[in-house]
Amino acid sequence: MDANGDLYISDYEKHEVRRWKPGDTTGTVVAGGNGKGDRLNQLNYPTYIFVDQEHSVYVSDWNNHRVMKWVQGAKEGVIVAGGQGQGSSLTQLSNPQGVVVDHSGNAYVADSWNHRIVVWPPGATKGTVVVGGNGEGKQPNQFAYPHGLAFDRQGNLYVIDCDNHRVQKFDVETESS
């Protein structure tokens, strides 16, 4: 939900994200909605979404291995993370899941199949591993398919570590990868 109480839902079968305002019965497409694909006006299995204070919608585009940003009213998005095919280099993602954006516009991405959390500053062409990235595992510096991300008011990053059945808390200002 955004600050106005509007609800956003990703529909992986229709490859779109819709916004519902209170009382709305059909919703409005705010990302994708042009069929399955990899063009800038398309999505391919959108999963997690994040809405910033300007009502821009960030979408984990799972099968395109990228995160897209759709500013309010845009007909197409821009790639803010990944988009260079599936892989493990810092220019790539592998089945991204959770995405959260801080007040500076840095996009934190749960790079699920690479078992790491990567941050992409605005305009960056590659990310930086902030936690994980040490292979799949159960150690405190490892993940097994991270999914959800959230920040608390103190700036701590919470990571849903799916296959390890745990939630981990990190101070991303002091954690090393």
Image (cartoon, grey):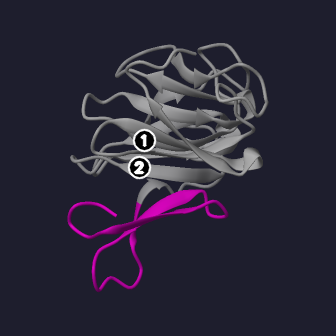
- Residue in view at x 26 percent, y 28 percent: 104
Secondary structure beneath dot 1 equals strand
Earlier sequence position, callout 1 versus callout 2: 2
Image quadrant containing the N terminus:
bottom left
- Residue in view at x 48 percent, y 32 percent: 170
Q: What stretch is highlighted in magenta?
A: 1-29
Which quadrant would residue 3 be assigned to in this image?
bottom left
User: How far apart, in angstroms, are the residues tagged by discs 1 and 2?
Assistant: 6 Å
On residue 50, which mark appears? 2
The residue type indicated by label 1 comes to: Val
Mark 2 surroundings within 10 Å by alpha-carbon count, few (fewer than 14), some (14 through 19), many (20 or more): some
In this figure, which residue is indicated by the disc labeled 1? 100
In the picture, measured across the screen, residue 8 lies left or right of residue 103, that is right
Identify which residue, 40 or 23, lies in the foreground: 23
Residue 129 belongs to the span the image colors magenta: no
- Residue in view at x 38 percent, y 85 percent: 25
Which quadrant would residue 65 be assigned to in this image?
top right
Q: In this view, does 172 lie above or below 144?
A: above
The residue type indicated by label 2 comes to: Phe
Give the image location of residue 14, x and y in percent. 62, 63
Q: Is residue 77 something that shows in the picture?
A: no
In the picture, measured across the screen, residue 97 lies left or right of residue 55, that is right
Give the image location of residue 114, x and y in percent. 72, 27
In the picture, measured across the screen, residue 105 lies left or right of residue 129, that is left
